[in-house]
Image (cartoon, rainbow, N blue to C red):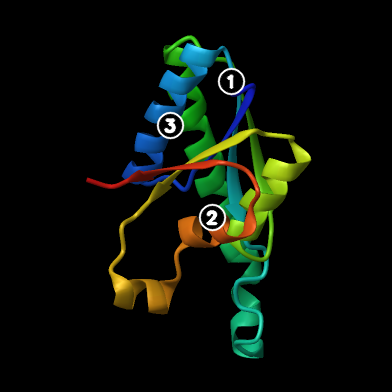
Amino acid sequence: MFKHILVPVDGSDTAQMAVDKATALAKAFGSRVTVIYVIDPYPFTGVGTDFAYGQAEYLSAATAEANQSVKLAKQSFADSGVNVETSVVEAHTAWRGIVEAGESLQADLIVMGSHGRNALEKLVLGSVAQAVLSHTKLPVLVVRHA
């Protein structure tokens, strides 16, 4: 039923819960799996030139975090006998990177975590899962943090 599952990760416990669900699905359906981590290469756009000096440091730290997150996810899949490909992608927003990756990789399911933020937190911080649901045509399995 699902030939290719896309699993976006961010290093959180909730993302690991999504990895666990995706592992079970991949084993059940014999699916290919791709794990991605989305980095916003320009998070300070519009904030002012005072933040420009931190761009290189931010990208270095974000890349290190991304590599660690996909490495952990890959190991989790491998421990369960599921082959997985990984990728670190750049996009202006996490949701856009996930949606574009799903389309370009021709995934037929996205399995992702949701941090379960309340209404005020969503207003201030946004919801990546909600934005993905709003902008993709692919089915999405949202794994909520308990």
User: Mark 2 or mark 1: which comes first in sequence?
Assistant: 1
Q: Which residue is mark 1?
A: 1
Q: Residue at x 73, y 44 (%)?
A: 103
Q: Nearer the viewer, mark 1 or mark 3?
A: 1
Mark 3 is on which residue type? Val
> What secondary structure is found at the residue carrying circle 1?
loop
Mark 2 is on which residue type? Leu
On the image, the x and y values in percent for residue 77 come to: 47, 20
Q: CA distance from mark 3 to mark 2?
A: 18 Å
Residue 94 can be seen in this image: no
User: Mark 1 or mark 3: which comes first in sequence?
Assistant: 1
Residue 74 can be seen in this image: yes
Q: Residues within 10 Å of mark 2 (few under 14, many from 20)?
A: some
> What secondary structure is found at the residue carrying circle 3?
helix
Mark 1 is on which residue type? Met
Is 14 situated above or below 79? below
Check the image and name the residue furthest to the top. 81
Q: Which residue is mark 2?
A: 133
Q: Residue at x 41, y 36 (%)?
A: 18
Is 108 situated above or below 143? above
Q: Nearer the viewer, residue 43 or 1?
A: 1
On the image, the x and y values in percent for residue 43 come to: 60, 71
On the image, the x and y values in percent for residue 12 come to: 37, 46
Name the quadrant containing residue 131: bottom right
> What secondary structure is found at the residue carrying circle 2?
helix
Q: How many marks?
A: 3
